[in-house]
Amino acid sequence: MGMGMNSQTIHPKEVVLRRLNMTLNQPFTTSFGTETGKDFCLVEVIDENGNSGWGESVAMTGPFYNEETTETNQLMLENYLIPAILGKTFHHPDEANELFAPIRRNRMAKSTLETAIWDLYAKNNQISLKQALGGDEQKQIEVGVSIGIHDSVEELLKVIEGKISNGLRKIKLKIKPGKDVEVIREVRKVYPDIPLMADANSAYTLEDIGVLKQLEEFNLMMIEQPLQSDDILEHSLLQKQLKTPICLDESICSFKDAKEAIELGSCKIINIKIGRVGGLSEAKKIHDLCKEHGIPVWCGGMLEAGVGRAHNIALTSLSQFTIPGDTGPSRHYWKEDIISPEVTVENGIVLAVSGPGIGYAINRDVLDRYTVDKKVFSA
Ligand SMILES: O=C(O)CCC(=O)c1ccccc1C(=O)O
Ligand SMILES: [Mg+2]
């Protein structure tokens, strides 16, 4: 794993747990609701050398994407996860995953701390997180945009036009029953050839197969998570009846889920989200499995602030990330980001930064301005 036997051990001495509140530049509507901002946990893990590793919780405010929330993440971090790491010695970040294993699920909470340990590990070894993960530092990270459900097609077309003129590499449209076939038809009339996909966030059942089949004529790159958020079996039945590749998001919470989905033929593509699967170690294992089976992957977004965005970019440096991800520029989401420089994208490619760990510095002034609560835990 990158550094081998000579790598520096990690001794977390202090953890600062912040609660941040940021407002999105525009509301984001999916089949499960509308987000106007992000209320989230951010951790800073400090070691005996005074280095800091950063991790961001990607949980939503309410339990509608999955079962976790900002509140449940804060509780798990305070009562179980932070106490578990303080005073411990880690030879490699994979050990955090093992340490957290007795705690059931709560994967976004675990990921918050685990990703910070990865950042700290890379910084202590003076390598980039991309390198620590085994990724290619020179890789061009291609990104697209995820566009929420709009009331009018005219509005939606205007948003798409702006994103295409910025050179973004993939347009992902949120759909739900009643806002699907006709919307995609109108978009395809204007843009017959753009790389286009749809994300249903579990809004359909097998009984809707008629509607899903109508989407086949639009040459979509994939349809993301059409059925239940915890289903693997019914997606395999659906995929047998669709030419359009199914991509799973919500259903893949672990390596084991990915294995089952691949064996059953439940999808042809997997959206890997670090938080959803419990951290970077598990994300990398899923990536490696997909590579072995020829399943293309891409990195999904959770409306992250800069720290989460930086972790996504590092993960995307792995070779099986061959489809443009959701990790767009900070400016698309926020007036000001908590990292410096903010994430910038030119012609659909993320501008590379260099430096140890996540490679971006924390902008402490901006961070303090968005911090609504802060607690310090010491060994
Ligand atoms: O721009 C992004 O960060 C991706 C937005 C997105 O699609 C999303 C945002 C919040 C919760 C779930 C999803 C999803 O991919 O399903
Ligand atoms: Mg999705």
Image (cartoon, rainbow, N blue to C red):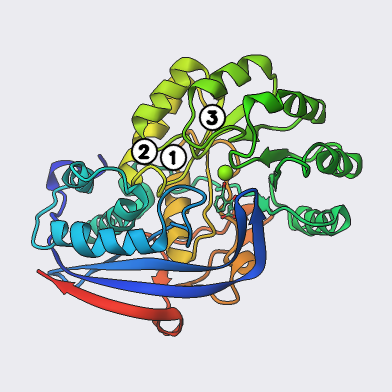
Query: Could you tell me if the residues under marks 1 and 2 are in contact, i.e. CB atoms within 8 Å?
Result: yes
For disc 2, the neighbor class at 10 Å (few under 14, some 14 to 19, many from 20) is: many
Tell whether circle 2 marks a residue whose Cβ is less than 8 angstroms from ligand 1.
no
**Residue in the image at 70% along x and 28% along y:** 208
**Residue in the image at 70% along x and 24% along y:** 209
Residue 296's mark?
3
Query: Taking the image as drawn, is residue 259 in sight?
Result: yes
Mark 3 secondary-structure assignment? loop
First of labels 3, 2 by sequence position: 2
Task: Tell me which amino acid carries mark 1.
Answer: Leu
Query: Taking the image as drawn, is residue 367 in sight?
Result: no
Q: Residue furthest right?
A: 189
Give the alpha-carbon distance from disc 3 to disc 2, as whole Å: 13 Å
Task: Tell me which amino acid carries mark 3.
Answer: Pro
Task: Tell me which amino acid carries mark 2.
Answer: Lys
Q: Position of residue 289 (x, y in %)?
A: 39, 26
Query: Could you tell me if the residues under marks 3 and 2 are in contact, i.e. CB atoms within 8 Å?
Result: no
Q: Is residue 55 left or right of residue 247?
A: left
First of labels 3, 1 by sequence position: 3
For discs 1 and 2, the disc positioned in front in the rendered view: 2
Q: Is residue 188 left or right of residue 336?
A: right
Give the alpha-carbon distance from disc 3 to disc 1, as whole Å: 12 Å
Residue 318's mark?
1
Q: Position of residue 201 (x, y in %)?
A: 59, 42
Q: Position of residue 309 (x, y in %)?
A: 48, 58
Tell whether circle 1 marks a residue whose Cβ is less than 8 angstroms from ligand 1.
no
Front-lying residue, 217 or 4: 217
Q: Is residue 127 left or right of residue 148?
A: left
Mark 2 secondary-structure assignment? helix
The residue pinned by badge 2 equals 284
**Residue in the image at 25% along x and 39% along y:** 1
